[in-house]
Amino acid sequence: MKTLRAVITGTGSYAPSRIMTNDDFAAYLDTSDSWIRERTGIRERRIAAEGEATSDLAVEAAKKALESADLTAADIDGILLATATPDIAFPSTACLVQARLGATRAFAFDLNAVCSGFVYAMTVAKSLVETGAARRLLVIGSEVMSRSLDCIGPVYRRSQSHHYQNSESSRWAFPRKHHWCESRTPVCSA
C-alpha cells in the first residue's frame, strides 16, 4: 500500500493597499516607531479598505495559490479557511470563497481559533490528504482585524494597537511562520 504524504504545491498572498506605519500610530498614541519595532519588529501593517471583507482578501490569495500550483478551482477537493473575522455568521466565509472561485465540487468550512487557526487548518488538511479523504485542498488564513478595533478611540491601548493588520494567506499543506505582517496561501496535495 502506497503511503500518501501531504506537500505544499503552491502559495499565494494578498494584502490590502492601505499601509499604516508606526509613525501613524505615534500621531495619536503615546508611542513611537522605535518602541513598537523594539518590542515586535513591526514597521507597518495593512488595513482593509471600507467594504473590503475577509473573503475578498481570501479570494485574491487563493487565485495566486492556484496559479502557483498550476491548478484551477475545479481541481480542488476542499477549502479550509482559518479566520476569527468571518464576513457573516453563515454561510461560512469558506463557502463564500468557494462560490466566488467557482470551486463547485469542493467542500468548504471555516476554522475559528484566532492565531492558531491557520496551524489547525494545515493540520486538518494534512490529515485529510494523508488518509486519502481528499487529494487537493486549499488552506486559507484571512483576517480583517481592523473592523473590530477602534484605532483612535479612548480604549485603544499602546500595548496592543500596533499588532493588528489585515492579511490573507492560502496554501496547499504545511507550515507557516507567524508574523502579523506576513500573508500566504498554500495548496496541499498528495
Image: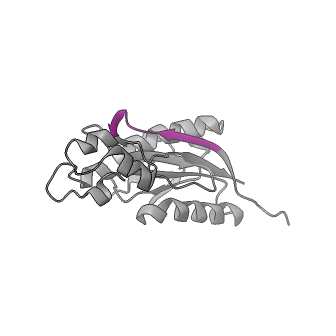
Query: Where is residue 71, by image quadrant?
Result: top right
| Residue 187 x, y percent position in the rendering | 61, 48
Q: Is residue 101 or residue 19 the one in the foreground? A: 19
Residue drawn at x 86%, y 66% as measured from the top left: 1
Return the residue nearer the eye: 166 or 86.
Answer: 166
Magenta stretch holds residue 87: no
- Camera-side residue: 1 or 189? 189
Dominant SS type (magenta) = strand
Q: Magenta residues, as a range?
A: 10-21
Horizontal and vertical percent position of residue 168:
45, 46
**What coloring was used for the rendering?**
one colour
From the top left corner, tell me how far across and down residue 15 is, in percent. 42, 39
Decide which of 15, 137 is in the foreground and name it: 15
In the picture, measured across the screen, residue 7 lies left or right of residue 164, that is right
Give x and y (percent) for residue 5: 75, 59
Q: Is residue 52 visible to us here?
A: no
How many numbered marks does the figure carry?
Answer: 0
Q: Is residue 34 above or below residue 173?
A: above
Report the residue at 35% width, 36% height from top: 19
Seen at 34% across and 55% down, the residue is 86
State whether residue 106 appears in this view. yes
Q: Quadrant of residue 135?
A: bottom right
